Amino acid sequence: MIDSAPIDADLIAADNERRRVELDADFAHLGEQLARRDIRIDEVVSHLSTLSVALPSWGVGSGGTRFSRFPLAGEPRDIFEKLEDCAVVQQLGRSTPAVSPHLPWDRVDDPVDLRERAAALGLEFAAVNSNTFQDRPGQALSYKFGSLTHTEKSVREQAIAHNIECIQLGKQLGSRALTVWIPDGGNFPGQSDLTAAFERYLESMRAIYDALPQDWSVFIEHKLYEPALYSTVIADWGTSFIAASELGPKARCLVDLGHHAPTTNVEMIVARLIQFQKLAGFHFNDSKYGDDDLDTGSVDPFQIFLIFHELVDAELRDAPGFAPAYMLDQSHNVTDPIESLLESAASVQRAYVQALLVDREALREQQEANDALAASSTLRAAVQIDVEPILAMGRLRRGGAIAPVSIYRASGWRARAAQERPQRLISEPGIV
Ligand code: PSV
Ligand code: MN
């Protein structure tokens, strides 16, 4: 256990002090540029402070691929140590105050104690994730051939009971949503009855839906393929939307950026879900080929900007029912997870700020006039602005670090953790 406050406050203060003059100059210069467009930079900084992105509890460990997992010295071994690492991310970046737990990975005997330990670190809990994609020691029935859609009722009942247990734990943690992603599907044409499997899904989900407290939501997460390689029951946003509509207003659709076919226009999916009040929120990450779970914004930052363009539009026009939950869902294989999460949270913030800077009035006129070229360049003008001084000033004003990764490296956190958290000598496959 590392008991001290995550990172030495003096270290942060001294580093901020050294960087302050330069930041003030850059911020003032950007402020002048934005003022020419009638944008007040301080308003953008305070607007930015309304954005928060939850951290996945599993994201602070090394991920792995289906081939292997290479543990990082000093990575957290349980939910309490995961919280400590999340607290580092929050202390330096100041945009990630909540942690999304995954059960049974984060199961504890005393959830009230867990909630208090999180609060002491300045953290709260976001959506609880259920896990019916693995068999755990002592589990009565196997999920090898599915969970909520399994052909056998007893397996479905076990999976439903697990989801209800997640809700019970989440209530004690102060969470308000359950995220359900299931691996169910088939590997061969003919293996499963496509219609019956979805019917069983709806029946199982109705039982879970009925167990939701009044102020809770259930987030349905779709994914194109994997581990099922031929037919996945909840493969796309259409299926997710049908399920959410069948279930009722507490059910909405969660968009994990890696869960679509390459070239899918995800921002259009987002617009549709907003329009019909079914957008639950996001699992942000990035990818080149599939569900790569790479750091958010590391491959295609323009895509995340285009998504935020839709989100900001909905926010500014006060779209009915618009209250998306933002979260990262990444797998870190070659980086220190704390550094990746800091960079990814900043990528989300960057996209948000850039979307805030879009000249929406001009864009609207250009769209109405069918001036495709002007509309496209109005949109792109926002990403051509270097908004780093806004992000850094935002962190500074909220008590964080101007240069989070640099301070994190200087702090020696990981080396200290490596001494205090002896590595588990087991080889495991990666996460899903
Ligand atoms: C599935 O690939 C997924 O995106 C779901 O959100 C799971 O909960 C998470 O990854 C587990 O790693
Ligand atoms: Mn996900």
Image (tube, helix red, strand yellow):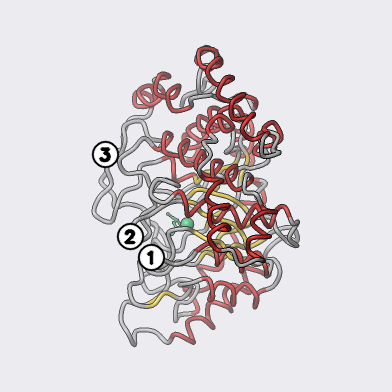
Is the CB of the residue bearing disc 1 within 8 angstroms of ligand 1? no
Ligand 1 is found in the corner quadrant, namely: bottom left
Residue nearest the observer in this picture, 210 or 291: 291
In this view, the mark in front (3 or 2) = 2
Pointer 1 residue: 262
Q: Mark 3–mark 2 contact, CB under 8 Å?
A: no
Amino acid on which the number 3 mark rests in the picture: Leu
Q: Tell me if residue 110 can be seen.
A: no
**In the rendered picture of this protein, how many numbered marks are placed on residues?**
3
Q: Tell me if residue 41 can be seen.
A: yes
Q: Is residue 47 above or below residue 279?
A: above
**Mark 1 and mark 3: Cα distance apart in space:** 37 Å
Pointer 2 residue: 289
Label 3's element?
loop
Q: Mark 1–mark 3 contact, CB under 8 Å?
A: no
11 horizontally vs 216: left or right: left
Q: Mark 1–mark 2 contact, CB under 8 Å?
A: yes
- Neighbours of disc 3 within 10 Å: few (<14), some (14-19), many (20+): few
Amino acid on which the number 2 mark rests in the picture: Tyr
Q: Is residue 31 above or below residue 299?
A: above
Label 1's element?
loop
Quadrant in the picture for residue 150: bottom left
283 horizontally vs 124: left or right: left
Q: Residue at x 33, y 30 (%)?
A: 422
Res 416 label:
none
Residue 419 location, x and y as percent?
34, 23
The first of marks 1 and 2 along the sequence is 1
Residue 306 location, x and y as percent?
53, 55
Amino acid on which the number 1 mark rests in the picture: Pro
Pointer 3 residue: 425
Residue nearest the observer in this picture, 173 or 262: 262
- Neighbours of disc 2 within 10 Å: few (<14), some (14-19), many (20+): few
